[in-house]
Image (tube, grey):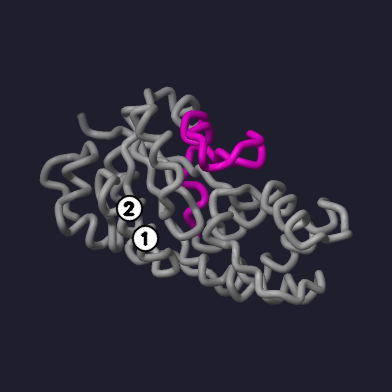
C-alpha cells in the first residue's frame, strides 16, 4: 500500500538546524553561567522544551526557574531561526510534488511552537501543512508515537496510511509498532551509530529530497499521478 500522507519532523528533517543548536547552546550556557561544555544534544534530541530544560536544570544544578530558563532558550534561538536556518536540499520540490498529488502533509515536532512558525513562514511553506502536532502540547516526547498518531487522526487516516519523516532513531520502534512508514533523513550532525541504525531499520534512507525523488522512491512509496513531470 502506498502512503496517502506525510508527517514531517522539523529540526534536521525539513530544516538544517541541528548545527545551529551547537552554536546556540554555547551562547545559552554563557547566559546561564554553565561552565562545562553541554554535551547532551544527541541524547536530548527527542525532548520538547520543558523536558529538556528540566533535564539540564537537574544536570547542572541551575537555580533559575523552568519558565525563566525556557524564555532564555527561546529568545536565544529566535535570532538563529529567523536569520540563519535554511531548508534542507529539495524540501520545496518534494512538498510541491506532494501538494500536486493531493498527499496530505503535517508537522510533528518537539521544537518550540514559536520557532516552528517563524522558520516555516520565513521559507513560505507554513501553509502547506494541514496540521501541527507538538510534543510539548501533548506532554510527551519522541520516544512515543503520540505526535504522529495525533497528526494521522486529524487527517482522518490510519497510521499505516502515513509515512513519518525523521532524522533520529529513537521514535522508530514505536512508530513502526503503530504501522507508520519511517523515512530516515540524513543529517550530518548525527553520530555514525545513529546513521547506521537508520539505514538498517527505516523503510527508506534519504540523503536529500532531490535524491529521494530522482531515485524513484517518492513514486514508489506515495500515491502519485502517473506521467507527472518530477
Residue beneath disc 1: 193
> Residue drawn 50% across and 47% down?
127
Q: Of helix, strand and loop, which one carries label 1?
A: helix
Task: Give percent across and percent down for residue 141.
Answer: 58, 41
Residue beneath disc 2: 197
> Residue drawn 49% across and 53% down?
10
Magenta run includes residue 142: yes
Toward the viewer: 203 or 164?
203
Task: Give percent across and percent down for residue 119.
Answer: 56, 60
Q: Mark 2 and mark 1 in contact? Answer it, CB < 8 Å.
A: yes
Task: Give percent across and percent down for residue 11.
Answer: 50, 58
Residue 53's disc number = none
In this rendering, does residue 118 appear at all? yes
In the rendered structure, which segment of residues is drawn in magenta?
124-150
Q: Quadrant of residue 56?
A: bottom right
Relative to 86, 90 lies left or right: left
Relative to 47, 126 lies left or right: left
Q: In the image, is residue 21 above or below residue 177?
A: below
Task: Give percent across and percent down for residue 84.
Answer: 56, 74
Quadrant, the C terminus: bottom left
Amino acid at each position: 500500500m502506498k502512503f496517502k500522507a506525510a508527517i514531517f519532523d522539523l529540526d534536521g528533517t525539513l530544516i538544517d538546524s541541528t548545527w545551529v543548536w551547537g552554536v546556540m547552546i554555547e551562547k545559552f550556557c554563557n547566559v546561564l553561567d554553565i561552565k562545562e561544555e553541554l554535551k547532551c544534544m544527541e541524547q536530548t534530541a527527542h525532548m520538547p522544551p520543558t523536558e529538556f530544560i528540566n533535564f539540564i536544570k537537574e544536570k547542572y544544578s541551575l537555580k533559575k526557574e523552568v519558565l525563566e530558563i525556557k524564555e532564555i532558550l527561546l529568545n536565544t534561538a529566535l535570532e538563529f531561526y529567523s536569520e540563519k536556518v535554511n531548508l534542507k536540499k529539495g524540501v520545496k520540490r518534494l512538498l510541491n510534488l506532494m501538494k500536486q498529488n493531493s498527499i496530505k502533509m503535517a508537522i510533528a515536532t518537539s521544537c518550540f511552537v514559536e520557532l516552528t512558525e517563524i522558520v516555516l513562514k520565513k521559507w513560505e511553506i507554513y501553509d502547506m501543512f494541514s496540521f501541527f502536532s507538538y510534543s510539548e502540547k501533548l506532554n510527551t516526547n519522541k520516544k512515543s508515537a503520540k505526535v504522529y498518531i495525533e497528526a494521522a487522526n486529524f487527517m482522518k487516516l490510519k497510521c499505516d496510511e502515513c509515512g513519518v519523516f525523521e532524522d533520529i532513531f529513537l521514535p522508530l520502534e514505536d512508530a513502526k509498532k503503530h504501522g507508520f512508514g519511517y523515512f530516515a533523513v540524513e543529517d550530518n550532525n548525527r553520530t555514525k551509530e545513529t546513521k547506521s541504525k537508520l539505514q538498517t531499520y527505516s523503510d527508506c534512507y534519504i540523503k536529500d529530497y532531490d535524491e529521494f525523488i530522482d531515485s524513484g522512491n517518492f513514486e514508489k512509496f506515495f500515491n502519485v499521478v502517473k506521467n507527472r513531470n518530477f
